[in-house]
């Protein structure tokens, strides 16, 4: 839903989904294999031509720094305007991102508000460009979804159906 909101409201030509190998600020967050996460993303979006998937960070492996991906996409699309879509909960943490000043020159950030995270403008990062996207405010996160799976609660209406089927068929996020 966040990808759709950003695509529609910001008039994007394409939206590339980039699953991280390992997020640097969430060192214990990876709960499934790269192959499973890529397969779930494909299952969730394969029918929707607005979205593309890049496995760049997964192939690269290790910690996924946004700056590396932004450089990669700048090389692929040298004449395009680049945006990076984030949740509004990430705005207070942007100063912690690797090479944030260079990143701010490469991309404009589109942020979607998240319930419980009031948005405060950042003025401490030179050149930072922010574009607000009034998305559908959903108070769900990946930790909650994994816990729902562990407790055998429904993921319906939270996750695309084909991704739910993949999770069930592969017994992901269940206590083993």
Image (cartoon, rainbow, N blue to C red):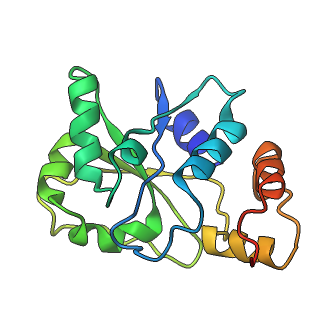
Residue 173 falls left or right of residue 57: right
* Residue ID at (77%, 47%): 160
Query: So how many labels did they put on this image?
Result: 0
Residue 168 falls left or right of residue 68: right
One can see residue 2 in this view = no
Image height check: is 129 above or below 145? above
Foreground pick, 24 / 70:
24
Image height check: is 143 above or below 57? below
Image height check: is 129 above or below 52? below
- Residue 132 in the image: x percent, y percent? 43, 52
Residue 175 falls left or right of residue 69: right
* Residue ID at (62%, 67%): 142
* Residue ID at (21%, 39%): 71
Foreground pick, 82 / 27:
27
- Residue 131 in the image: x percent, y percent? 38, 49
- Residue 127 in the image: x percent, y percent? 14, 52
- Residue 150 in the image: x percent, y percent? 78, 76
Foreground pick, 35 / 76:
35
One can see residue 167 in this view = yes
* Residue ID at (47%, 75%): 118
Quadrant containing the C terminus in the rendered view:
bottom right
């Amino acid at each position: 839903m966040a990808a759709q909101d950003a695509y529609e409201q910001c008039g994007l030509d394409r939206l590339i989904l980039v699953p991280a190998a390992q997020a640097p600020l969430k060192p214990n967050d990876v709960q499934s294999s790269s192959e499973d996460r890529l397969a779930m993303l494909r299952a969730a979006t394969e029918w929707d031509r607005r979205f593309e998937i890049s496995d760049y960070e997964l192939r690269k492996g290790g910690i996924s720094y946004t700056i590396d991906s932004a450089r990669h996409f700048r090389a692929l699309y040298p004449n395009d305007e680049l945006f990076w879509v984030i949740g509004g909960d990430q705005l207070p943490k942007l100063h912690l991102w690797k090479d944030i000043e260079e990143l701010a020159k490469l991309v404009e950030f589109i942020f979607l508000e998240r319930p419980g995270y009031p948005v405060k403008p950042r003025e401490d990062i030179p050149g930072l460009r922010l574009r607000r996207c009034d998305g559908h405010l959903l108070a769900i996160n990946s930790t909650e979804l994994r816990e729902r799976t562990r407790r055998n609660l429904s993921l319906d209406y939270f996750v695309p159906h084909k991704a739910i089927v993949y999770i069930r068929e592969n017994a992901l996020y269940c206590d083993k």
